[in-house]
Amino acid sequence: MPPLKSEMPAGAPLSLSQVSLTINDILCDVASGTTIADWINAQGFDHRALAVAINQAFIPRSLYATTVFESGQVVDVLHPMQGG
């Protein structure tokens, strides 16, 4: 998976309109109200090719547009692979 595009440098002071969370082991600051779909689109990823878990719970693709990131969450963005 390509490197993440961070909204702000890690450790930068947060304003009230931002939340700090961890995405794929990288501390990220995103705008308050950012949904999974917003973030995926900003990264230039195809949401159909990704699986997303928040705090170890997978989120259905049907909820990407309405699931808002919250401060302190641990997010895993995965590219599923088939195999056996």
Image (cartoon, rainbow, N blue to C red):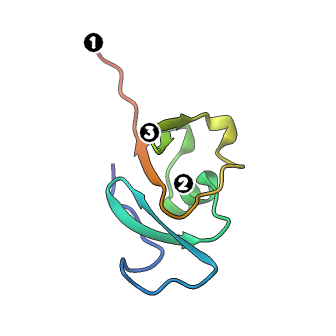
Residue 66: x and y, percent?
Answer: 72, 49
How far apart, in angstroms, are the residues tagged by discs 3 and 2?
A: 18 Å
- Asked where in the image residue 69 lies, by quadrant, the reply is bottom right
- Furthest residue in direction front, as rendered: 72
At label 1, the amino acid type is Gly
Q: Residue at x 35, y 21 (%)?
A: 82
**Which callout, 2 or 1, points at the residue further toward the start of the chain?**
2
Q: Residue at x 48, y 74 (%)?
A: 7
Residue situated in front as seen by the camera: 1 or 70:
70
Q: Secondary structure at mark 1?
A: loop
Q: Mark 3 and mark 2 in contact? Answer it, CB < 8 Å.
A: no
Task: List the residue tagged with mark 3.
Answer: 56
At label 2, the amino acid type is Ile
Task: List the residue tagged with mark 1.
Answer: 84
The answer to whether residue 17 is above or below residue 2 is below
User: Looking at the image, how many numbered discs can be counted on the residues?
Assistant: 3
Residue 43: x and y, percent?
Answer: 49, 60
Task: List the residue tagged with mark 2.
Answer: 40
How far apart, in angstroms, are the residues tagged by discs 1 and 3?
A: 23 Å
The answer to whether residue 37 is above or below residue 62 is below
**Which callout, 1 or 3, points at the residue further toward the start of the chain?**
3
Residue 58: x and y, percent?
Answer: 51, 35
How far apart, in angstroms, are the residues tagged by discs 2 and 1?
A: 28 Å
